[in-house]
Image (cartoon, rainbow, N blue to C red):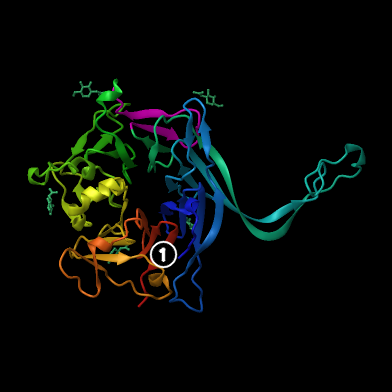
Amino acid sequence: SYTSKKKSDIISTVEFNSTGELLATGDKGGRVVVFQREQESKNQPHRRGEYNVYSTFQSHEPEFDYLKSLEIEEKINKIRWLPQQNAAYFLLSTNDKTVKLWKISERDKRPEGYNLKDEDGRIRDPTTITALRVPVLRPMDLMVEATPRRVFSNAHTYHINSISVNSDYETFMSTDDLRINLWNLEITNRSFNIVDIKPVNMEELTEVITAAEFHPHQCNTFVYSSSKGSIRLCDMRASALCDNHSKFFEEPEDPSNRSFFSEIISSISDVKFSHSGRYLMTRDYLTVKVWDLNMESKPLETYQVHDYLRSKLCSLYENDCIFDKFECVWNGSDSVIMTGSYNNFFRMFDRNTKRDVTLEASRENSKPRAILKPRKVCVGGKCRKDEISVDSLDFSKKILHTAWHPYENIIAVAATNNLYIFQDKVN
Ligand SMILES: *[C@@H]1O[C@H](CO)[C@@H](O)[C@H](O)[C@H]1NC(C)=O
Ligand SMILES: *[C@@H]1O[C@H](CO)[C@@H](O)[C@H](O)[C@H]1NC(C)=O
Ligand SMILES: *[C@@H]1O[C@H](CO)[C@@H](O)[C@H](O)[C@H]1NC(C)=O
Ligand SMILES: *[C@@H]1O[C@H](CO)[C@@H](O)[C@H](O)[C@H]1NC(C)=O
Ligand SMILES: *[C@@H]1O[C@H](CO)[C@@H](O)[C@H](O)[C@H]1NC(C)=O
């Protein structure tokens, strides 16, 4: 586990690269930390590699929008890796307004023997240059550098909640509360608006976009979710502006469950395509749902994340927790899903066996070789010794962001300022 105490260190996003060897986190202070997995050593082939800090850099700085008198936070909302094309790694990071493309590269040689400048980079007096030198590369300690390659700005009036790289690897989209823009990775001064739900009169606004993602294989298809609990699948081949969805997924509300909080708790905080591209997973306040792309009328599966909170919605509204945005992830084979809860608990649901488990991210559990013990929450009455009462849950400890290694049973769980990485034991 990696720990800190400062508020700016609160982790706001976690993302593995597509081989799982690199893991990036973004935080409230605008920093990105990249972890790299140790190479497996030949002497201990059964010991799995640990993740060590590879590079840390400041991706975004706080800014001030003078026209609107608004502060723009440096907090990193999302990170997405690009496929590797040469020795360097590339990732996109975004705060509320600006997406940046970063290049992370290694350097272990340094050029020496310039003609026009000295070794410290100062320009030499031309009259003292009498001989021509041939510059040489000298070895030096390995250095990892992060350099901003492109800045995609000035295209969002509202807050960016998602970025998603297209499977054509040439374009990506950025999504705010009311609009989705499509960018070419090479072009920063122009983007195309592909969804716009802003009503002519803002007083008629009833719904905002909460998340969006490209299909993993079909480059013309993407989905976006809304605060009303619906999901729209769009086809970019149909028209330039995808305001007309091609599929609309929504579950009719159970009238017996209707309450003052129904609309708030049905807002979708995350939407993810399965690796296969056949299913969608959505997270709302109390549940995770799996949808078949071929069935719009209702979800295929619904999993209760923390149904015991249904009776506490009033106090969760008063302390604003009801607006927490929990993410959800698939494991590499789409058979298990994971999402967070309170009290540093997170949940896993096995879609085949229908078994579910509550686990806890804690300092104690993160000791090497510690085994995660399932936890149980009890409602009313007497709790058993190993159970925790719903009234003693700590709502300030929440797991909003998690990531699952693309091929292995390794998960990364962000619990406020701590990052926990849990891996399966090898036999
Ligand atoms: C992910 O990171 C690893 C380790 O550095 C690298 O070898 C691999 O090519 C990366 N994968 C992609 C798709 O970028
Ligand atoms: C974007 O920049 C390129 C290169 O600087 C320029 O040729 C092009 O006209 C610009 N496009 C817009 C829409 O400003
Ligand atoms: C969306 O669909 C409606 C009704 O089918 C149609 O009138 C409208 O022109 C369509 N809009 C676009 C942008 O295709
Ligand atoms: C209605 O509430 C019950 C628990 O009170 C829950 O199990 C059920 O899933 C809810 N129905 C819907 C459609 O959300
Ligand atoms: C997904 O989880 C299942 C159940 O634990 C496991 O058998 C499978 O290997 C996992 N898939 C990957 C790719 O990690």
Q: Residue 238 falls in which quadrant of the image?
A: top left
In which quadrant is the N terminus drawn? Answer: bottom left
Can you identify the residue that label 1 sits on? 421
Of all residues, the one furthest to the top in this rendering is 200
Which segment did they paint magenta?
178-199
Residue 270 placement (x, y as % from top left) = 30, 46
42 horizontally vs 408: left or right: right
- Mark 1 falls on what kind of element? strand
**Please, which residue is most extreme toward the left here?**
256
Instruction: Residue 112 in the image: state x and y as whole percent.
Output: 77, 52
Q: Does residue 189 belong to the magenta stretch?
A: yes
Image position, residue 58 (x, y; %): 55, 47
Residue that appears at 92% across and 38% down: 127
Q: Is residue 14 above or below residue 211?
A: below
Evaluate whether residue 287 shows in this view. no
Q: In this view of the protein, which residue sits in the foreground, 422 or 105?
A: 422
**Three-letter code, disc 1:** Ile
Q: Is residue 201 visible?
A: yes
Image quadrant containing the C terminus: bottom left
Q: From the viewer's perspective, is 203 left or right of 255?
A: right
Please state the horizontal and vertical placement of residue 271, each as a whole percent of the image: 29, 46
Q: Residue at x 29, y 21 (%)?
A: 201
- Residue 58 falls left or right of residue 10: right
Query: Would residue 47 be counted in the magenta stretch?
Result: no
Residue 263, picture quadrant: top left
